Image: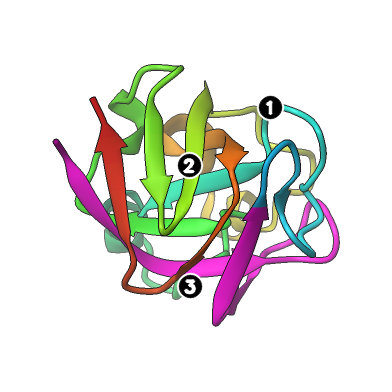
Amino acid sequence: MKRAYIEEVCTSEKKGVQKTPTARIEMRPDWGIEGDAHAGNWHRQVSLLAQESVDRLQQLLTKIRLRPGDFGENIVTRGIVLFELPIGTKMRIGTALAEVTQIGKECHQGCAIREAAGDCVMPREGIFVKILEPGTAQKGDVIQILE
């Protein structure tokens, strides 16, 4: 049984923008995060990105300081290589149950981080999940990969 931790939870009211850290998120089945622009009945309800992925890119950048949510991720994790999880993997994120539905994505036009940094890690190392059971999550909560 693998465990990881939540470094930060983030939301935004609009798509295509950086997300802002928030104290806690509430997740609903077949919807995603309450109040987040990406919520809806589709396969990319919640996005996750590992802090380790962000840290590797940060080492290459000298003029930009990367912050949680800069890549449009909802949940910043620590302690697991997210992009190695197979599609269909189930996990507990805080108290919610989620399933991995997509690894990576195409970067959208005008990606603020790609334009500023010359690279965006989310298309390669970010993952997306759909929510199967409701729950909440906040910084410090455990993410448990279910075998």
Q: Image quadrant for the N terminus?
A: top left
Q: Secondary structure at mark 1?
A: loop
Which kind of residue does numbered mark 1 sit on? His
Coordinates of residue 105 in the picture (x, y in percent): 60, 28
Task: Looking at the picture, tell me which residue is in the foreground, 147 or 121.
Answer: 147
- Answer whether labels 1 and 3 touch (C-beta < 8 Å): no
Q: In the figure, 27 relative to 24: above or below?
A: above
The residue indicated by pointer 1 is 43
Look at the image and tell me whether residue 103 can be seen: no
Which stretch is magenta? 1-27
Q: Compute the Cα span from label 1 to label 2.
A: 14 Å
The residue indicated by pointer 2 is 97
Left or right of residue 3: residue 71: right
Q: Residue at x 57, y 63 (%)?
A: 70
Label 3 vs 2, first from the N-terminus: 3
Which kind of residue does numbered mark 3 sit on? Arg
Left or right of residue 23: residue 43: right
Label 1 vs 3, first from the N-terminus: 1
Look at the image and tell me whether residue 130 can be seen: yes
Q: Residue at x 40, y 29 (%)?
A: 90
The residue indicated by pointer 3 is 67
Q: Image quadrant for the C terminus?
A: top left
Label 1 vs 2, first from the N-terminus: 1
Which kind of residue does numbered mark 2 sit on? Leu
Reply yes or no: does residue 26 show up in magenta. Answer: yes
